[in-house]
Image: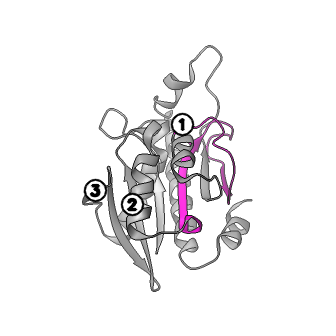
Amino acid sequence: MKLIVGLGNPGSRYEKTRHNIGFKVIDALAQRSGITLHESKFSGLYASIHKNGEKAILLKPLTYMNLSGESVRPLMDYYKIPVDHLLVIYDDLDLPVGKIRLRQKGSAGGHNGMKSIIQHLGTSDFNRIRIGINRPPEGMKVPDYVLGQFSDAERIEMESVVQTCADACEEWLEKPFPEVMNQFNS
């Protein structure tokens, strides 16, 4: 069993923000599988999908970004999911808008959701998909930027990026993560 986690913040106030791009990928995967995330335990919304005999849980932590590990760790413990079967999807200020980067490990890079997950798991050695949202314009504070919405042009581009990330997640259900990295890190 594998776990795919999309990071974001709950509630309509945050729904279309840059910080919620991880939630959007989980929504796309759920839609492709014809399911809704209906279970609400482990401080999150989740559901299972099956693809070619592989079962995966899709999770949207509802803890707010900075406490994401409080949702991820208990679910992993309950289902006995090893850390190498975890994939976390999140926004990244250090990549240009629309650029994605798949990695098997790394630091939190200043991302508070990732800091929380790393702290709760006691390791940073897990799979991730970073989705570029770019840096804020001069004079704008980072929290205001990540909690802001994409421009119309960016939103159109990000719709395509979300589908590409969903493709990568589905490939991971069939292939080892290094192969998926080679395929999607262009």
- Mark-to-mark CA distance, 2 and 1: 19 Å
Q: Is residue 109 above or below residue 138?
A: below
Instruction: Identify the residue at image location x=56%, y=64%.
Output: 83
Left-right relation of 39 to 117: left
Residue that label 2 marks: 75
Residue that label 1 marks: 112
Judged from the image, the secondary structure of the residue bearing numbered disc 1 is helix
- Ranked by sequence position, the earlier of labels 2 and 3 is 3
Judged from the image, the secondary structure of the residue bearing numbered disc 2 is helix
Point out which mark residue 41 bears: 3
Q: Position of residue 135 (x, y in %)?
A: 64, 30
Left-right relation of 10 to 165: left
Badge 3: how crowded within 10 Å, few (<14), some, or many (20+)?
few
Q: Is residue 36 above or below residue 170?
A: above
- Mark-to-mark CA distance, 2 and 3: 8 Å
Badge 1: how crowded within 10 Å, few (<14), some, or many (20+)?
some
Instruction: Identify the residue at image location x=48%, y=46%.
Output: 21
In the image, the segment drawn in magenta is 83-112
